[in-house]
Amino acid sequence: MRKVIGGKSIGGLAAMLPVFGAAGTCFAQRTQRAISDAPLVSFFYEEPLWIFCGMLAALLLGAVAFWRCWRQWRSKERRLRELLAHDRYTGLRNVTWLEQTGDALVRAHGGEAARMAVVVIKVVQPSIITATYGREALVTLFQRLGERLTGESWAALVATRTNAAGAACLTHPVEREDLQVALRRILADSEYLQVGHMLVRIPLEAGVCYLGAPPMDLNTAINNAGLAAQEAQPLCFFNSALQRETLLRSRMESLQQRALERREFHIWYQPKYDLVTRKCVGAEALVRWQSTELGFLPPGKFISLFESNGFITQLDFYNLEHVMQFQRDCKAKGLPVVPISVNQSRLHMREKGYLHHMRALVDRYTTEGIELELTETAFDFGSEAIREHSLAVVTALHAMGFAIDMDDFGSGYSDLSLLNQLPLDVMKIDRSLLLASEGSERMRIVLKMMIDLGHSLGMRVICEGIETEAQEELLRAVGCEYGQGFLYGRPMQRADFEAFLRAHA
Ligand code: C2E
Ligand code: MG
Ligand code: MG
């Protein structure tokens, strides 16, 4: 079956052909003629050469268009790759690039790769630096540090990660001692920075992880060096103990949620005593983790991890509810009800919905006999606005009926203005101050002045960590009325504490 194509559309096709120049014009004329007196198919049979040329030209045109698109796409891709390989603040290479490029370098070194290392340098408390001097200060610091590292003969690849306040470097094979000396020098030289008219000290910490044999992958080495940097004062080499610690932390992290559901967290109670009557006048609730997989874990093993991953906020609510329920049970059983303090992490101060959640608990139970312990670090977030917010949160908690304890007072920088700004009921003096007072008359004077200050601001004052009669005597002499410590009782399980209450309250 033959189909005749209308002269109009073929004419349109022919009209397009002049773009091919003279040959095109000729082809167009012939095509027009052919269309006028013969069906299209016969034209194809009559002019195969022209048809072939036309198709070839169209093909060429298509190929040129395709090539141009491909080139544009390639250059865009190259630009994107460049962007992805650079730290957008310093303009220097970033850690992603270091990982990608470093692999080949490590392979090229063969057996020598065991002596290659990853160095991670970080700013200590970057949020405070950014809040005080602005991000520009960090950017300048890392630009300088990056350039300095690049100039070192042992540095193979250097990268910065300004938004994580860190720099990383993959070294050539280098001896540990040489690296140690060089890094100490770099840290000392780099931590001073001119910001405007001021010379500012920005403390740095460095962690090092050797790749070992067979060499570990770079991502792991960077993580390990980062972990070592956290332990650094100011320089730390990653070792097997840190590795075990890392493994434990990652196991704890993967088990934390299930542990909460399985009720593996237990509250232990440590009595608080009246130093004069020597009677139990309260207790502190302290959490322990009885893990099916990891065994018994004291809070020193997991609190800092849960603070860093945020899980502590859930755990604190769980503990608080547990203690509120305990108080309700004591009342129901006719046991003496003494105030119990519960630790609250600093993270709650910036947690959305914290007050709402606390309100719901208060509505379900009561704040009677519940104290909340906060440390100074809860108000140590750098910016004035955040500090103001924290103060408002504590004021709201107090208004709900919770008594507020200032925990570990005297262990940090002891911001006395906090005592004035916060609605505090109890000052808990840190054990370190008690220990320092034992050996120093001057520290005893400081301790006494702190206790007097607490009293004159209307607070009850309790000292933590009393282990000996001599310490108790010292505290009585300086006017402290309450104490907590192994001398009176270690943290104990619920049943033991109930028995303790019957005997001592
Ligand atoms: P903290 O709140 O300052 O608790 C006092 C710590 O001192 C407890 O350690 C207690 O067992 C210990 N201690 C008490 N008396 C003595 C003593 O006479 N000598 C010595 N050397 N130590 C004594 P623990 O139970 O290991 O708790 C450590 C820290 O973990 C607590 O310090 C607190 O900051 C945190 N923590 C414990 N439970 C919780 C919790 O439920 N939530 C939060 N956010 N933190 C908690
Ligand atoms: Mg406490
Ligand atoms: Mg304490």
Image (cartoon, rainbow, N blue to C red):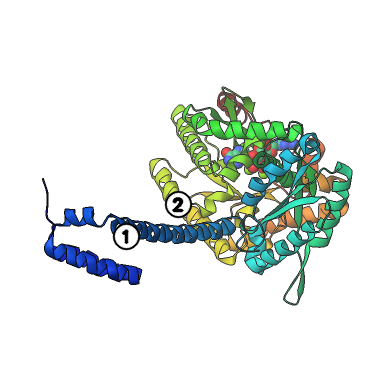
| Vertical relation: 169 (above or below) 465 | below
Please state which of residues 376 and 106 is positioned toward the viewer in this rendering. Answer: 106
Q: Amino acid at mark 2?
A: Leu
Q: Is mark 1 within 8 Å of ligand 1?
A: no
Residue 195 placement (x, y as % from top left) = 72, 72
Split into 4 quadrants, where in the image is the N terminus?
top left
- Residue occupied by mark 1: 54
Give me the residue at 56% from left, 55% from top.
81
User: Quadrant location of residue 476?
Assistant: top right
Mark number for residue 6?
Answer: none
Residue 198 placement (x, y as % from top left) = 76, 74
Looking at the image, is mark 2 or mark 1 earlier in the sequence?
Answer: 1
Disc 2 element: helix
Disc 1 element: helix
Give me the residue at 64% from left, 59% from top.
162
User: Quadrant location of residue 197?
Assistant: bottom right
Give me the residue at 52% from left, 37% from top.
319
- Residue occupied by mark 2: 355
